[in-house]
Image: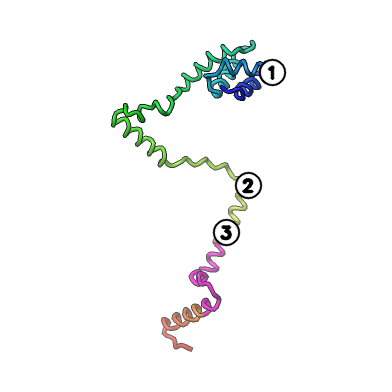
Amino acid sequence: MTPAEAARLLAKIQAYDGRTVGRADVAAWAEALHDIEWADASDAVARYFRTFTDWIQPAHVRSLAREVRSARGKRRPIGTSPFLMGQASWERKSRFVQMCRDAISAPTEKAPERPQTRSEQIRARAVQRACAERRSRYADELPLRRLVSPALREIAMRRATANESASDGSERP
């Protein structure tokens, strides 16, 4: 633990028990907890004050940090991984790789939608009606709306009316 982390930890402890913290305190705690990670120490402090009301000392933090680390199942440093050192069996490695692939490709669960308020329901129905009305009104023109220029649209409408009249058997004007 660095002196800056020790200062953060002592600030957390100060919030619990109201002690005053100085530079000497920070240096002493950093020296006593030099091999403890800040996350473990912070969890240890929270665990300590859930059960005790006495002033906490570095020895308390060290023992509780060990418990926190073992309960969390602290991983080994990257360089000592059996996968990287080649000590794991091929089957174990392939199961691990497959498990990672499954976790990555698994679909994420969609959060349940909150119920709509009355006004939101009315608005949704109005939007649906307006969309349906617009679709029915412009259903004939929908393919023509994709044309970019108005001149092309006019030519296409003339051809469409000419084709309709030709299929009806009537003569062209």
Q: Which residue is mark 1?
A: 22
Residue 168 covered by magenta stretch? no
- Asked if 106 appears above or below 134 in the picture, the reply is above
Q: Which residue is mark 2?
A: 118
Identify which amino acid the numbered label 3 is placed on: Arg
What type of secondary structure mainly makes up the magenta span? helix
Residue at 49% x, 20% y is 69
Identify which amino acid the numbered label 2 is placed on: Arg
Q: Badge 3, how many Cα within 10 Å: few under 14, some, many 20+? A: few
Residue at 40% x, 42% y is 105
- Asked if 43 appears above or below 141 in the picture, the reply is above
Q: CA distance from mark 3 to mark 1?
A: 69 Å
Number of the label disc, if any, that sits on residue 129:
3
Query: What percent of the width, then of the height, locates residue 7?
Result: 64, 22
Of labels 3 and 1, the one closer to you:
1
The kind of secondary structure element at disc 3 is helix
Q: In this rendering, would 87 be left or right of 50?
A: left
Q: Quadrant of residue 149?
A: bottom right
Specify which label sits upstream in the sequence, 3 or 2: 2
Residue range corresponding to the magenta coloring: 132-154
The kind of secondary structure element at disc 2 is helix
